[in-house]
Image (spheres, grey):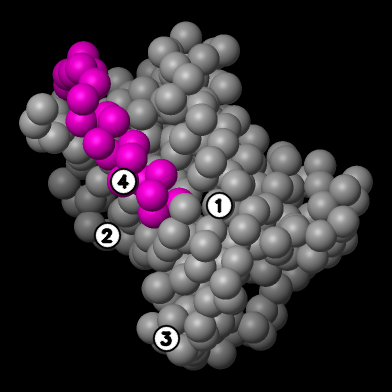
Amino acid sequence: MSLALQPVTRRSIFYMILASLCFAAVEFFGGLLVRAINPYQLIWGRYSVHLLFMLVIFGPRYKTRLVKTPHLKLQILRSLTMLAMPVTFLLAASRMPVDDVWSVYWLTPLMMLGLSTLVLHESVGKVRWVAGIVGFVGMLLVYRPDQSILNPASIFALAMALAISLHLMLSRILRDDHPFVSLFHTALWVFVVLSFFVPFLWQTPTLSDIAAMVVVGLVGALGLFALARAGELMPLSVVASFSYTEAIWNLALHLLILRALPGKSELLGVLLIGAVTVFLFIYESRQVHPEDPLVHPL
């Protein structure tokens, strides 16, 4: 049987893997390069760059069409999930080991499958559930959580997972809006909310901090665009578990830039995730996904 994917399915999988690469890069370079400023200021700076980029590149062409949407309340809610995600991460990471935070967070693909079934009424099936669970086991091997995972602060890590899951679900619901409109609103409302608080937290950034914020902002914007497109083009059940590839990109970045060799458990986990990714790619190639033509008259 041919393994040729439908074009839309292939693009949605590509976008999810690209989003995973971008988020791995944001986490890696943000932690490596930005140290002198408050983390909330870093988040504000990231979305400031995101907004400025869109206004400069797309503003002259699209003008007010970049903002207009018939679903403003949903767009605001979707944007605020991207504020909730880093805030809950900071709350969790201040109370428990970071590896344990990420271990809980990687329930995200399983949450996406649950939302796909319960809210969007999309077909998931046993195969995708099993693949999602195996991928999660791979993530546990990568992060090797200890008993701190039972810390009550894990509720913040769960909230972080729920935030990104809701973001992708809302992307699916808002798929009739133009991707650039959704991308603009994603940054706009995080920027607006944080602008009320940043003046009280302000620390003067160095030139290297500013350069890092620009990189994180641009790469993060690309990641959010790719994540939204993955959810817009195909049901969450199709793309959810491809987000586990972030572990592969994390390992590659640490290996190539820091020359940090993975441990046996981490390597086993990444190999397991790689196997799940290949399996799902072959599995989805054999499914018939009805194409969902989108018209975006921006």
Q: Nearer the viewer, residue 102 or 286?
A: 286
Q: Does 215 sit left or right of 179 as displayed?
A: right
Q: Check the picture and name the quadrant holding the N terminus.
A: top left
The residue to which callout 4 is attached is: 278
Whole-angstrom CA distance, mark 4 to mark 3, is 26 Å
Whole-angstrom CA distance, mark 1 to mark 2, is 41 Å
Q: Is residue 219 above or below residue 240?
A: below
Mark 1 or 3 closer to N-term?
A: 1
Residue 166, percent from left and from top? 56, 31
Magenta range: 273-296
User: Are circles 1 and 3 on residues that touch, CB within 8 Å?
Assistant: no
Q: Is residue 205 above or below residue 219?
A: below
Q: Which mark is residue 161?
A: none
| Residue 252 seen in render | yes
Amino acid type, callout 4:
Val
Whole-angstrom CA distance, mark 4 to mark 2, is 39 Å
- Which structural element holds mark 2? helix
The residue to which callout 2 is attached is: 56
Q: Is residue 134 above or below residue 206?
A: above
Q: Which mark is residue 138?
A: 1
Whole-angstrom CA distance, mark 1 to mark 3, is 23 Å
Mark 3 or 2 closer to N-term?
A: 2
Disc 2 crowd rating (10 Å Cα; few below 14, some 14-19, many 20+) is: few
Mark 4 or 3 closer to N-term?
A: 3
Q: Residue at x 63, y 40 (%)?
A: 107
Mark 1 or 4 closer to N-term?
A: 1
